Amino acid sequence: MLVVMQSHATEEQVRAVCQRIEALGLKAHPIPGAARTAIGITGNDGAVDLGVLESMPGVVECIPVSKPYKLVSRDAKEEDSVIRIPTAAGDVLVGGAHLALVAGPCAVETEAQCREVARLLKPTGVRLFRGGAYKPRTSPYSFQGLGEPGLRILAGIREEFGFGIITEAIDNESLDLVEKYADVIQIGARNMQNFSLLKRAGRAKKPVLLKRGMSATLDEFLMAAEYILSEGNYQVMLCERGVRTFSDFSRNTLDLAVVPAVKKRSHLPILVDPSHGTGKRHKVLPLSRAAVAVGADGLLVEVHHQPEKALSDGIQSIVPQEFGELVGEVRQIAGVLHRIVN
Amino acid sequence: MLVVMQSHATEEQVRAVCQRIEALGLKAHPIPGAARTAIGITGNDGAVDLGVLESMPGVVECIPVSKPYKLVSRDAKEEDSVIRIPTAAGDVLVGGAHLALVAGPCAVETEAQCREVARLLKPTGVRLFRGGAYKPRTSPYSFQGLGEPGLRILAGIREEFGFGIITEAIDNESLDLVEKYADVIQIGARNMQNFSLLKRAGRAKKPVLLKRGMSATLDEFLMAAEYILSEGNYQVMLCERGVRTFSDFSRNTLDLAVVPAVKKRSHLPILVDPSHGTGKRHKVLPLSRAAVAVGADGLLVEVHHQPEKALSDGIQSIVPQEFGELVGEVRQIAGVLHRIVN
Amino acid sequence: MLVVMQSHATEEQVRAVCQRIEALGLKAHPIPGAARTAIGITGNDGAVDLGVLESMPGVVECIPVSKPYKLVSRDAKEEDSVIRIPTAAGDVLVGGAHLALVAGPCAVETEAQCREVARLLKPTGVRLFRGGAYKPRTSPYSFQGLGEPGLRILAGIREEFGFGIITEAIDNESLDLVEKYADVIQIGARNMQNFSLLKRAGRAKKPVLLKRGMSATLDEFLMAAEYILSEGNYQVMLCERGVRTFSDFSRNTLDLAVVPAVKKRSHLPILVDPSHGTGKRHKVLPLSRAAVAVGADGLLVEVHHQPEKALSDGIQSIVPQEFGELVGEVRQIAGVLHRIVN
Amino acid sequence: MLVVMQSHATEEQVRAVCQRIEALGLKAHPIPGAARTAIGITGNDGAVDLGVLESMPGVVECIPVSKPYKLVSRDAKEEDSVIRIPTAAGDVLVGGAHLALVAGPCAVETEAQCREVARLLKPTGVRLFRGGAYKPRTSPYSFQGLGEPGLRILAGIREEFGFGIITEAIDNESLDLVEKYADVIQIGARNMQNFSLLKRAGRAKKPVLLKRGMSATLDEFLMAAEYILSEGNYQVMLCERGVRTFSDFSRNTLDLAVVPAVKKRSHLPILVDPSHGTGKRHKVLPLSRAAVAVGADGLLVEVHHQPEKALSDGIQSIVPQEFGELVGEVRQIAGVLHRIVN
């Protein structure tokens, strides 16, 4: 923390701030400049909230210096974390040199629908299947997902096609079930700061895919992951899915720069969801290419065999054939970056 | 829903869209313009997601027309809802002509702290006391609240001082306890779209204070309230607490225009939280005045007797004496609007 | 500037950064913390762009500490600036205890229109008249303003009714004319960082009203004013007119917290434009009250006698009678703050 | 325009709105739904501002349907526009299958600096050189550019190295000179809605590179281009350079989804500036790859041989060797999209 004093702050005011800092058991380092004095603080492990110094006389502002995350930080672990998702056909790796594709419908609607999508996806080489049994919907009157029967359908898909299964949990009850039926537990954007759910996910024995909240800063995103790691689950994958801005032509603004930003600060892998990230079918392919080009560790793509009949998000779903083209193009781009596509 | 066709869309394309609409059991109303044709759709009760029409040939875009909320709408109930919070000294009313003030510390830290704040607040005339026993914190290493012992402290404050108690629930488990100990159940900004929690709150027998999410649109905010009403709990108060923007000088941007916007669309009361809304102590008083002047139905203000020692959010807490001045000024402004301050 | 080193930065890396700083003629102040070292820099007058230190090995980030503004700062002048606008009926004062109301149509359309609006405004007691002769419009096909003939109409209004005249300049050519015909030169939001225009305004002999850009940070806003002062014109009034956010229910998000934030940092007065700030007629009155309650030094309100026939922005214009009510309410609220309404 | 009536609007109110519409010389098309009536309007060429209907009794809101742009629209010209920039070594093409790279320092500082950067860039195969002689700077105390002498240095670079020259104009005076000395006239983000400058650029005989404003919607961006085309200059290239959001880890948020969005609506080419778009040197390469992968028609990259000594924006400049690697990677990705790199 750095405390910036007013240019006309008195020596007495500077001294008072230093004394307050020392009284908190910390060390004050005054730096007298030509225009004003700034005071560095060391010794704080995060327990003391120093922002209050801002209301002392002569203080302009308090600037946080240290980053709050620990376990997710590259300071804690320098090499990339590689997450291992077991499937019938061997482990799928995510992170490091390994890039993973995930595809499937927004929602599990019926067994027939999931099997049809799975059947059409199989030849594309994708190995992870997604589909929601619990759907967080803006309206209470929209389709809310099948719940446990939906999870059973997904387990059947794994059985029949050998896919690893990723599906969302929305509260502690559904997380218990998702942990039982699926291979990866997804925490959605709306729950990124549902700390109760994050703690429960931190006690799960399966990998977690954590989506960035709609207006989460990078620090908040990494701190949400820190919640999971701090409870003992180190198997965390991040996922950028677009943030909310003033932009008027797409559902969200896909913030691809977060990928190199995460990689600079954290060892965790980060995937990109171009379907929610754009909200429009015709943008999924170009943004998928861009996500792989920027260095993402994977893609999460909504695919439906009949998007116009989908119970949710049909507008952003592509058909299996388009997904096949997508796989072809992103494989080539992954090659330019010397990445291995799972 | 209105479907806008390209200016060079063929008659056949227009016809195909109309047929698709009719096939869904809805009615298509083509409106041929000089430049292009638009097609109105009627008969949709919200069950069908029409966005997918956007991918049909010749279509430019689909524009939603109807608002999705029902029970929270002024269409459903024209007069203002007035929420009644029972206290030892009689009911506190919120909404209509009645404006309610809520004050107290960010977090329940100790019994002594709460009693001291309560003692100092009592003479200001405020009748509702706030304080968090469950604290959603960005960092897992920050103080997370006292939990049930904190709720018991709040119940003691009610007993001793006669305040009504407002406190936050963060998951289904804590909501059970909050419903038991408190008078109003608060749902925080980070949980505004925790739909599982909203449904549980909808089955509670106590009033709910629902805070706007950090990047919630007005429709999303009202739909979150709709979740609670749709489960049978009509005792809902909304609360603006600042939204996230590019702005660099305050923690959030307090969006006061949402107050008249809510009042135009909904019968529910809306309060304002100038403490979180600005994140800075010196802005709490001016923004409190502004909130009452814009027509808010109440204020939620963080007050601490020793802000510099607060375990959370000391930087935005004012001292009881400042709150006394605040009450004086907002009473005068409320008078200009012919509002009754509880 | 504060340079934050990585927790595992070597002593050599810290030394290299310090040497680079000293080589630039500045002074380095290393602050060794438990987790990492930070290096304070003093002696920089703003000429050296230190951000590049961020690319040196071992550096995490560079945090600017000093504020870049000088002349607009309270450090330069502690008491509030009061701007004096001469009119036939004596000076109108803006700033300090003085609060000024400005009203008039969005655009000067015809002499008859301006005279009718002026005639209806006169009894409300407002003393400053606004109206655009040069209109920055999103579309080249929209009404662009009458130009110099419009300025002559405004000069006629001053002659006939005794109002002071505020009108916008959009380039150096129009600024020459506005300076000649009007009493206050307005720089619009879209030109807030048209630095060529700001410099020209800085050489003008009349007061300038500078509107905040749609996504201007507070520092950028104050630096834009600094451009004007740095050329010798100290007669500057700021104006908040709403910023662009994700918000879906109003044209802009009126950021009233900027008022106390400006007042903390600068001696310049700041007005609020609730018409552009909300873009909706029914929000103008409540947000006007809120602006005065938060401490604004004035209001800029669009008033048209026939909003439904206005050539621009009719949707946000109120009628003169509504403006009369507005004056009544804001006078009462100004009284609570002990302000004098001009 | 579509006018949405309240669900309890009376027939009389619907009739009144229709009559008002017809009185304006337009045609009203009422669409009675189960819940409410909507009224389509046809016959409006944009001259009438219909938003005011929103204040009529019984009206909920007015929804614009037609897009305001004409000449920039794919409705006006279906095939991609290809801009031709003449250089000593033949024309550089931008748009359609052709992708152009532009590189050079942020600011023209000295002749020696420009010649050194140019000399190092030449072997990378890049054919367009950028550098600012007029610099829009947030602070009046920062380096403002060399002005005409800077333009003469750029003309010398063209002479010596055969590059095409792109440089920014900031007002009508500088545009006259830029048109004389350079090959492409750049309009910067801060001037995207400097309509006076746009009109002047529309009368220029050279191609224009128009950067997106910091918070410009897609419609505003295209309408700014429409200003230039409407004055007769059809040689316009757009450029995405990042938008302003809440994001805390980069200077701007690069909005790559705007590329397919522009291509859907307009025939104009669109480039991407990853230097301003991220503001950090280590993000330039990954975002350059992503920009080409998403389908951009070119890149604008800041390159400096000694970024740590740059007079502006050193923090986001890469060195010529890094640019060489960038060219290698983006050429491969362009190949995946069957694009020709100039």
Image (spheres, coloured by chain):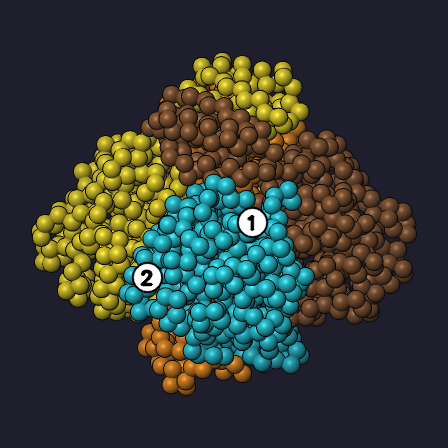
Chain colours: A yellow, B orange, C brown, D cyan
Task: State which quadrant residue A292 falls in.
Answer: bottom left
Q: Position of residue D267 (x, y in %)?
A: 46, 73
User: Circle 2 sits on which residue?
Assistant: D331
Left or right, residue B130 beside residue D142: left
- Establish if D324 lies above or below D93: above
Q: Earlier in the sequence, mark 2 or mark 1?
A: 1
Residue sitting nearer the eye, C191 or D274: D274
CA neighbours of label 2 inside 10 A, class few (<14), some (14 to 19), many (20+)? some
Q: How many marks?
A: 2
Left or right, residue D229 beside residue B212: right
**Amino acid type, residue under disc 1 in the picture:** Thr
Residue under the point 37% across and 50% down: D321
> Label 2, label 1: how many angstroms apart (C-alpha)?
31 Å
Task: State which quadrant residue D229 falls in.
Answer: bottom right
User: Disc 1 is attached to a residue of which chain?
Assistant: D
Q: Position of residue D210 (x, y in %)?
A: 53, 63
**Amino acid type, residue under disc 2 in the picture:** Arg
